[in-house]
Image: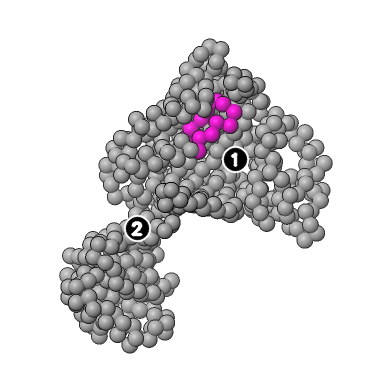
Amino acid sequence: MIRRILLTSLLFAAPLAAQPPATSSLAEPAQFENPDRLAQLSTAFPEIDRMMREFAERSRVPGIAYGIVVDGRLAHVGTAGIRELRSRAPVDTGSVFRIASMTKSFTAVAILQLRDEGKLSLDDPAERYVPELAALHPATLDAPKVTIRHLLTHSAGFPEDNPWGDQQLAATDAEMSAMMRDGIPFSTAPGTAYEYSNFGFAILGRIVANVSGMPYPRYITERVLRPLGMNSTTLEARAVPAGRLAHGYRLRDSAWIEEPALPDGAFGPMGGMLTSVSDLSRWVAFMLDAWPPRSDPARGPLSRASLREMQQVARFSGAVVVRDTAAGTVSLSAGGYGYGLGVRQTCLYRMVVSHSGGLPGYGSLMRWLPEYGVGIVAMGNLTYTGWSGVTDRAIAALARTGGLQPRVPDAAPVLIMRQQQVIRLLTNWDDPVARGFEAMNLFLDEPEERRRAFIQRLVAEAGGGCRQEGDFLAENALRGSWRMRCRDGDLRFAITLAPTEPARVQYLDVARMGRDERLEAPPACR
């Protein structure tokens, strides 16, 4: 997550400009440094195939399909088992599975499209577009109206409804309207807590239909699916060719029992989507394409900025830390919900975006690492197929190849210039060319003479004769650190620039570091 920039040959060779140009947008987008990363990652595919087959056999999933997305393309796809018991027809790459709650991210994209077109605001009360909600009794007298944002982030205060919601897909618009008019109880006040609500996303689907003037399935097909080339994806099981539909099954008393295919209805926006592994991989690639922020023309039915907005925590849902006393390790999972997507941080990855889907007859998962450009999709035709564990192991297999490395940010030219000015101070604190790097706070926070004496003492204790060793590490465009190797020891320098034009150094830290100590960002779990 930090960019390494080799500057040794540049430190004293070129004259420094008196003032740098404006810093806005000067840094290049973060990028991958390994040109062979796909080839490295590919070496894990046979191991992942074995993991997936063993998982399906152990869990008694009739059929599975899975894919690995790397840099916007489906780099690997696998299938195993059967899609229909009676005919023993095998699952293939064109087989279509129901993906249940993963539909929610499609609904979120539709809402953000309408928001970006100026047709609604996320902070509008939902009842403005769904009049049946106007009669809801408030959770408390001081509670706010339920907003679109509340619905998108599972914070409307409606009770968690997974068992009940799974059986509502076939409800008609009239039946859903009657439910809303009858009232929806609140488990918490709107905007105060995370609680997963399928009903909330069904209401979002009604908002899409009412605002756009199009039935939800038609809107999603024309405005979202077709522009992405997702031609195998639908909300209606009857629209899937019989030779491609993966039938859903439940395991009861060690026997597979076929689940009836629920027709699409008013609750479809929360969980009705059916898709293939290739189409779902397109969806994950679309989400990954939002990263990193950059200036080239956008592609797809939603702006990259709005896609990134979806993939950031909007409602915190908690943190879990587990210590393995035998291994002496700690695992972390902290995060919450964005818009139709879950977002977590772990000890290993700063950002993991995912959503699972489970309905009678099906279980699915999509998970990706935005900073790494890699994602995994997986679908099975067994009720609530639990993909989380095997997907974690698949990502671990990719990591073991050495090819799973994050993009690294670039430093703005002004950051490099300020670094060179700081280095010049080590040989001549009064060098007029080197001065002028400091923001107005730097010598107010620590008087110049004290700061000068401290740095000079550290340099003397390290034996003097200090020169940069190794690369400059950019944490972002305006923050970075580097190692200075002196005769008897090493020093770590770190600077952060201020939000001014031109940007000057607001933070300067110098500390001793060991010869063998790595210059890197500290891990999340330590």
Instruction: List the residue tagged with mark 1.
Output: 104
Residue 43 position, x and y percent, is 30, 35
Residue 443 placement, left or right of 484? right
Residue 365 placement, left or right of 43? right
Camera-nearest residue between 201 and 459: 459
Whether residue 272 appears in this view of the structure is: yes
In the displayed structure, would residue 57 be above or below residue 21?
A: above
Which sits earlier in the primary sequence, circle 1 or circle 2? Answer: 2
Residue 128 position, x and y percent, is 73, 50
Q: How many marks?
A: 2
Residue 349 placement, left or right of 423? right
Which residue is at a point 50% across and 38% down the rendered structure image? 388
Any mark on residue 484, and which?
none
- Residue 350 shown in magenta: no
Residue placed farthest to the front in the image? 326
Foreground mark, 1 or 2?
2
Please state which amino acid type lies under the numbered disc 2.
Ile
Residue 514 position, x and y percent, is 26, 67
Q: Which residues are magenta?
A: 377-388
Q: Residues within 10 Å of mark 1 (few under 14, many from 20)?
A: many
Please state which amino acid type lies under the numbered disc 1.
Lys
In the displayed structure, would residue 265 be above or below residue 338?
A: above
Which residue is at a point 56% across and 41% down the rendered structure image? 105
Camera-nearest residue between 123 and 525: 525
Instruction: List the residue tagged with mark 2.
Output: 2
